[in-house]
Image (spheres, coloured by chain):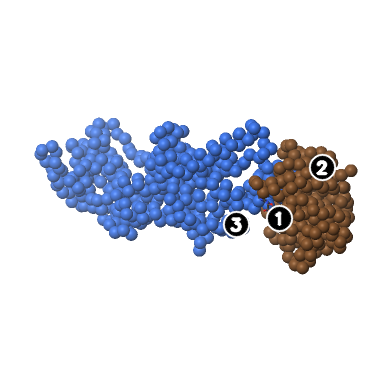
C-alpha cells in the first residue's frame, strides 16, 4: 500500500502554472531523490505535500486520505509529514532543546519531561547532544541542519521532506549532514529529498525523480537515471550538471 | 562616572516622589501663656508691626517671609511692650524712634524700635526661623508672648545666582514635576505597550483560505478597527487629544488619570506600528519552520514570531518612553502639574523666566540622556541591536 499518492497535482501562481499535473506514488520506507533544474517546481511540489502551498487542483492522499479541508487536518498531516528546509528555519528565540520540544509539547501534548529525555536521545544520534543549551545563532550551518533534522524527528513523522538540505552549507559541512541522513535512511523512515548532491542521491535513493517544467519527466532507479537516462531532457540536464560541478 | 550620575538621578527621583507623598509637617505650635486680662488679650490679638516700606503693617503671619527691616511698637493703648529678639540675622536698636503712619488723611506718630536685618540667610540654608519675645505690661499685669517669623533669602539679580536660587528654592516643585513626568511617561509607555500588543495583533492577523466566514469577518473587522485607531492617534496632536478627552468629556473626573489615558492611547498607536514592523521583518522561514511541524498560526505567532518581534522592538519602545518624557509637557494644557507646568507655576511665583526655563531644559536633558544611557546598557546586556536616538516632534 502507498503511504503517499499524488494525483494530477496542479499549482499556479497567478497565470504562471508551476506544477502541471504531477502523479506520484510513494511506498512506505522509500527514499526518493528529486532532481531537476532551477525553477522546475521541485520545492513547490514538496511544499504542496504538506500544504505550505495550497494546490490549485489535484489530490494528495496520505494513507489514502485527504487532509486539505480544514486547518486542523492540515496540522495533523504536518505532524506526520515534517519538513527540513534549505535555510534550517530553527526558531531563533529558542535554544536547541526548546526548538526540539516546542512542537511535540504544544501539538502532540506530550509531557515535557518525557520530551526532554527523547530530545537528548535524538540529539545524541545526530551528534548534537552537547549543544542542547545553545542558541541557533551560536551554531554552524551543518550543526543547525542536524538540529533541524532532530527537530523534525521529534514528531515521530512517517515522512520527512528535505528541500535542498545541504545547499546553504559550506562544502566542508555537507558531509556531516549527509551522514545523518544516511543513518536516518536505514531506520525505515520515508524520505523525499530535493537535492543537487548527485552522488549522494545515487548512493542512497531507492528511486530518483527528474522534474522538468512542472511535470515528473522521468523516474527510475538511480542506476538507470544516472548511468543510462532514457529521455533527452534528463540526459541534457545531467550532462550540463556534470560539466558544471 | 556615568554610573554615579545615574545613581544620583535615581536617588533624586525617588526622593522627589517621597516628598511628594509626605508633605512637610507643619511648624510646631508656640506655647504661649494666656491671661484673663482683657486689655492684654486685646493687645496680643491686635498688636501690629510695621514694615520699613511705607510703614505698612506686618501682621503676625506676614512675618513669615521677612526680607527687610521693620519696626516694633513699644506702646499699645496703655500697654507697654518690651522685646527680646533672638536671631543671628536681626538686631534691635537700643533707642526708640518716632515714625509717622498714615491713617486715612491724617498721620499719626508711633514710638518704635527699629529691627535691622543685618544679613540674609543664603539660599542653601533657606528660610530661617526667628522668635520675638514680647513682654506686654498693663498696670501691674504682664504677659510674655512669642511671635514666630521666618527670614527668607532673596533672589540674586544675575543669571547664575538667580538660577541657583530658583533651583534650590523650588527644588521640591521641580522634583515633584520631574517625578510626575516620569511616572506618566513610564506608566503611559507600559500601558501603551500592552494596548499595542492587541492593536498590532489585530492588524497582523490575516484571514486564511481555510477560515470560516465568521472568523474571517471578525479578523477583517478588527484589522480595520486597528488601522483606523492607529491612523487617528498618529494623525492628531496629543495636545488636541488631551483637550478633547478632558475638556470635552472630563474623563475619569481626574485630569491626571485622563492624561495617563491619553498618553497610553497615543503611545499605543506608535508602539503598535513598531511591533508590526518588527513582526513583518521576521524571516518568513520562522513561520514556515513552525507551521511545518504542525503548530497552528496562533501558536506560531505566540511562541515563535512574537517573542522575536518584541525583543527586536525593545530599543524602539524604549525610545518611545524617552519621547514621552518630552511630549508629556503638553499635558500642562489640561492642568497636570508635570515638570513643564510646575516650571510655569514657578515663574509665576518669582518672575524669573529665563532661569526657570533654562533649569527645566537641563532637567529634561538629564532625564532623557540618562534614561537613554540606561536603556542602551540594558539593550547591550540583552544582546539587542541598539537604536540611535531619533528626533521626535
Ligand atoms: N510564492 C511564489 N509566487 C510566485 N511564483 C513562485 C512562488 N514560488 C515559486 N514561484 C515560481 O515557481 C517556479 C518554481 O519554483 P520552485 O521553487 O518550485 O523551483 P525549484 O525547482 O525548487 O527551483 P530551485 O532549484 O531554484 O529551488 C519558479 O519559476 C518560481 O519563480
Ligand atoms: Mg527549490
Q: Are marks 2 and 3 on the same chain?
A: no
Question: Do tag 1 and tag 3 residues touch (Cβ < 8 Å)?
Answer: no
Q: State the separation of the CA atoms marked 1 and 3.
A: 38 Å
Residue A121 percent location from the top left of the image: 83, 53
Label 1: chain? A
In terms of image quadrants, where is residue B330? top left
Mark 1 or mark 2: name the one nearer the start of the chain. Answer: 1
Q: Residue at x 75, y 39 (%)?
A: A68
Mark 3 belongs to chain: B
Residue that badge 3 annotates: B384
The residue identified by callout 1 is A39
Residue A72 position, x and y percent, is: 74, 38
What is the spatial separation of the Cα atoms under label 2 and label 3, in whole angstroms?
A: 44 Å
Q: Toward the viewer: B32 or B371?
A: B371
What residue do we see at 89% from left, 43% from top?
A: A1
User: What's the colour of chain B in the image?
Assistant: blue
Q: Secondary structure at mark 1?
A: loop
The secondary structure type at the circle numbered 2 is strand
**Residue behind label 1 places its C-beta within 8 angstroms of ligand 1:** yes
Amino acid at each position: 500500500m502507498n503511504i503517499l499518492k499524488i494525483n494530477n497535482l496542479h499549482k499556479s501562481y497567478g497565470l504562471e502554472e508551476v506544477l502541471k499535473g504531477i502523479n506520484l506514488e510513494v511506498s512506505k520506507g522509500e527514499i526518493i531523490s528529486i532532481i531537476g533544474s532551477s525553477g522546475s517546481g521541485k520545492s513547490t511540489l514538496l511544499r504542496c505535500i504538506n500544504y505550505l502551498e495550497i494546490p490549485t487542483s489535484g489530490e494528495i492522499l496520505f494513507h489514502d486520505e485527504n487532509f486539505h479541508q480544514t486547518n486542523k487536518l492540515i496540522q495533523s498531516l504536518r505532524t506526520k509529514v515534517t519538513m527540513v528546509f534549505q535555510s534550517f528555519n530553527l526558531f531563533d528565540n529558542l535554544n536547541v532543546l526548546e526548538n526540539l520540544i516546542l512542537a511535540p509539547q504544544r501539538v502532540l501534548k506530550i509531557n515535557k519531561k518525557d520530551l526532554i529525555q527523547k530530545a537528548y536521545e535524538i540529539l545524541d544520534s545526530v551528534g548534537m547532544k552537547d549543544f542542547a543549551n545553545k542558541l541557533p545563532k551560536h551554531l554552524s550551518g551543518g550543526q543547525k541542519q542536524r538540529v533541524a533534522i532532530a527537530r523534525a524527528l521529534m514528531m515521530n513523522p512517517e515522512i520527512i521532506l528535505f528541500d535542498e538540505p545541504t545547499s546553504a552549507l559550506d562544502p566542508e559541512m555537507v558531509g556531516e549532514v549527509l551522514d545523518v541522513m544516511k543513518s536516518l535512511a536505514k531506520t525505515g523512515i520515508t524520505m523525499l529529498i530535493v537535492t543537487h548532491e548527485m552522488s549522494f542521491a545515487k548512493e542512497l535513493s531507492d528511486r530518483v525523480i527528474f522534474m522538468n517544467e512542472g511535470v515528473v519527466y522521468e523516474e527510475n532507479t538511480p542506476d538507470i537515471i544516472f548511468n543510462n537516462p532514457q529521455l533527452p531532457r534528463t540526459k541534457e540536464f545531467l550532462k550540463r550538471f556534470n560539466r558544471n560541478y | 562616572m556615568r554610573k554615579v550620575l545615574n545613581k544620583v538621578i535615581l536617588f533624586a527621583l525617588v526622593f522627589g516622589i517621597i516628598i511628594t507623598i509626605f508633605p512637610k509637617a507643619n511648624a510646631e505650635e508656640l506655647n504661649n501663656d494666656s491671661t484673663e486680662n482683657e486689655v492684654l488679650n486685646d493687645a496680643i490679638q491686635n498688636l501690629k508691626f510695621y514694615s520699613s516700606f511705607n510703614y505698612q503693617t506686618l501682621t503676625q503671619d506676614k512675618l513669615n517671609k521677612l526680607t527687610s527691616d521693620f519696626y516694633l511698637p513699644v506702646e499699645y493703648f496703655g500697654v507697654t511692650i518690651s522685646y527680646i529678639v533672638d536671631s543671628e540675622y536681626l538686631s534691635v536698636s537700643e533707642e526708640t524712634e518716632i515714625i509717622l503712619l498714615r491713617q486715612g488723611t491724617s498721620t499719626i506718630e508711633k514710638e518704635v524700635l527699629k529691627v535691622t536685618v543685618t544679613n540674609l540667610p543664603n539660599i542653601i540654608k533657606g528660610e530661617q526661623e526667628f522668635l520675638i519675645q514680647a513682654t506686654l505690661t498693663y498696670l501691674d499685669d504682664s504677659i510674655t508672648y512669642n511671635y514666630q517669623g521666618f527670614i527668607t533669602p532673596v533672589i540674586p539679580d544675575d543669571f547664575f545666582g538667580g538660577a541657583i536660587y530658583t533651583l534650590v528654592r523650588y527644588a521640591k516643585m521641580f522634583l515633584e514635576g520631574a517625578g510626575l513626568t516620569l511616572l506618566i511617561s513610564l506608566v503611559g509607555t507600559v500601558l501603551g505597550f500592552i494596548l499595542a500588543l492587541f492593536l498590532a495583533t489585530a492588524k497582523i492577523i490575516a484571514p486564511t483560505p481555510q477560515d470560516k466566514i465568521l472568523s474571517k469577518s471578525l479578523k477583517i473587522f478588527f484589522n480595520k478597527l486597528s488601522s483606523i485607531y492607529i491612523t487617528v492617534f498618529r494623525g492628531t496632536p496629543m495636545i488636541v487629544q488631551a483637550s478633547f478627552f478632558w475638556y470635552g468629556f472630563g474623563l475619569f473626573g481626574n485630569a491626571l488619570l485622563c492624561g495617563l489615558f491619553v498618553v497610553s492611547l497615543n503611545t499605543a498607536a506608535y508602539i503598535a506600528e513598531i511591533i508590526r514592523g518588527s513582526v513583518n521583518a521576521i524571516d518568513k522561514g520562522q513561520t514556515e519552520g513552525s507551521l511545518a511541524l504542525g503548530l497552528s498560526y496562533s501558536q506560531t505567532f505566540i511562541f515563535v514570531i512574537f517573542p522575536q518581534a518584541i525583543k527586536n522592538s525593545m530599543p524602539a519602545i524604549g525610545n518611545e518612553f524617552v519621547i514621552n518624557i518630552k511630549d508629556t509637557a503638553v499635558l500642562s494644557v489640561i492642568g497636570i502639574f508635570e515638570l513643564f507646568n510646575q516650571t510655569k507655576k514657578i515663574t509665576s511665583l518669582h518672575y524669573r523666566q529665563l532661569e526657570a526655563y533654562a533649569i527645566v531644559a537641563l532637567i529634561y536633558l538629564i532625564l532623557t540622556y540618562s534614561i537613554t544611557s540606561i536603556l542602551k546598557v540594558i539593550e547591550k546586556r540583552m544582546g539587542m541591536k541598539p537604536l540611535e536616538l531619533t528626533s521626535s516632534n
